[in-house]
Amino acid sequence: MYEGLQNFRTEDFRLILRMARKVLPPDGLVLFGSIPDAEKLWSFYNTPDRKAEYLRRIAEGTEPIGTWWNKRQLREIGENEGFAVEILSQERTRHTLHYRFDARVANSP
């Protein structure tokens, strides 16, 4: 799932993992790519104008990125659902490297 997890909330992620559990083989995995990193939000909204736009859009409920994920929380949710979660840095060639990360979610043995 590439740049899709930002469109879901915490409980949705749990449901996605539960559904994945039903269809993945024992050694199966899912890559959640290009996840907005909550710790790097201000690396994306990195100018006064962009910050003001973000705050305005949050107040209106129209922030375009969606959910900014905390790596620790994402890992905890995955592990609670019985998956091994590996947080990955994006490749250096990605233009989104400064504010996104990837997560490899695998069935736990």
Image (cartoon, rainbow, N blue to C red):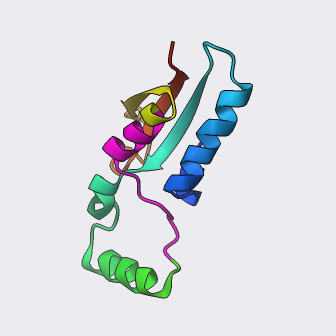
Q: In x, y percent, where is residue 88?
A: 39, 31
Q: Is residue 95 visible?
A: yes
Q: Quadrant of residue 84?
A: top left
Q: Residue 66 in the image: state x and y as whole percent.
A: 51, 64
Residue sticking out furthest to the right? 23
Q: Magenta stretch: residue 57 in it?
A: no
Q: Quadrant of the N terminus?
A: top right
- Residue 54, placed above or below residue 5: below
Above or below for 69 versus 22: below
- Which residue is found at the position 54% from the left and 38% from the top? 32
Work out whether residue 1 can be spotted.
Answer: no
Q: Residue at x 41, y 58 (%)?
A: 68
Residue drawn at (34%, 61%), measured in percent from left and top? 44
Inspect the magenta stretch and tell me whether residue 74 lies in it. Answer: yes
**Which residues make up the magenta segment?**
63-78
Q: What residue is shown at x 58% (from left), y 59% (from top)? A: 7
- In the displayed structure, would residue 66 be above or below residue 25? below
Total count of labels: 0
Residue 105 drawn at (x, y percent):
51, 29
Along the line of sight, the residue nearer the viewer: 48 or 102: 102
